[in-house]
């Protein structure tokens, strides 16, 4: 089943789905929309840190966390 067929199937069956399930699905989609830009921003910052050589070895990180 391709994406269009899946969407049509879901749309045809929405009136049979429990409202609680719809609310959970809605909440998950909203969180994804909020989370996505944050994750992209963090990934871009991490990439910049890597390119600039701002890295810790595992041992350095463990020392920093334990002190």
Image (cartoon, grey):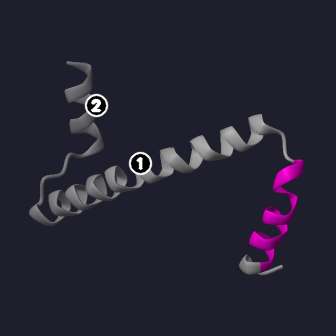
In the image, taking residue 16 as reference, residue 52 lies left or right, namely left
| Pick the front one: 38 or 10 | 10
**x and y, in percent, of residue 6 in the image:** 79, 72
Q: Compare residues 38 and 67 and report the one nearer the observer.
A: 38
Q: Where is mark 1, residue-wise? A: 35
Name the residue rendered at 20%, 56% in the picture: 45
Q: Is residue 29 left or right of residue 11?
A: left
Residue 14: image quadrant is bottom right
- The quadrant in which residue 4 appears is bottom right
Identify the main secondary structure in magenta.
helix
Secondary structure beneath label 2: helix
Real-space CA distance between mark 1 and mark 2, rounded to the nearest whole angstrom: 28 Å
Q: Which mark is residue 62?
A: 2
Task: Name the N-terminal-most of marks 1 and 2.
Answer: 1
Q: Position of residue 3 (x, y in %)?
A: 72, 77
| Element type where label 1 sits in the image | helix
| Magenta region | 5-16
Residue 59 sits inside the magenta stretch = no
Question: Residue 41's spot in the image, x, y percent?
Answer: 26, 56
- Quadrant placement of the N terminus: bottom right
């Amino acid at each position: 089943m391709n994406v269009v067929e899946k969407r049509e199937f879901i749309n045809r069956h929405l009136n049979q789905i429990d409202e609680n399930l719809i609310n959970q699905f809605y909440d998950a989609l909203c969180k994804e929309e909020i989370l996505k830009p944050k994750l992209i921003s963090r990934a871009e910052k991490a990439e910049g840190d890597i390119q600039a050589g701002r890295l810790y070895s595992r041992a350095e990180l463990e020392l920093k966390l334990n002190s």
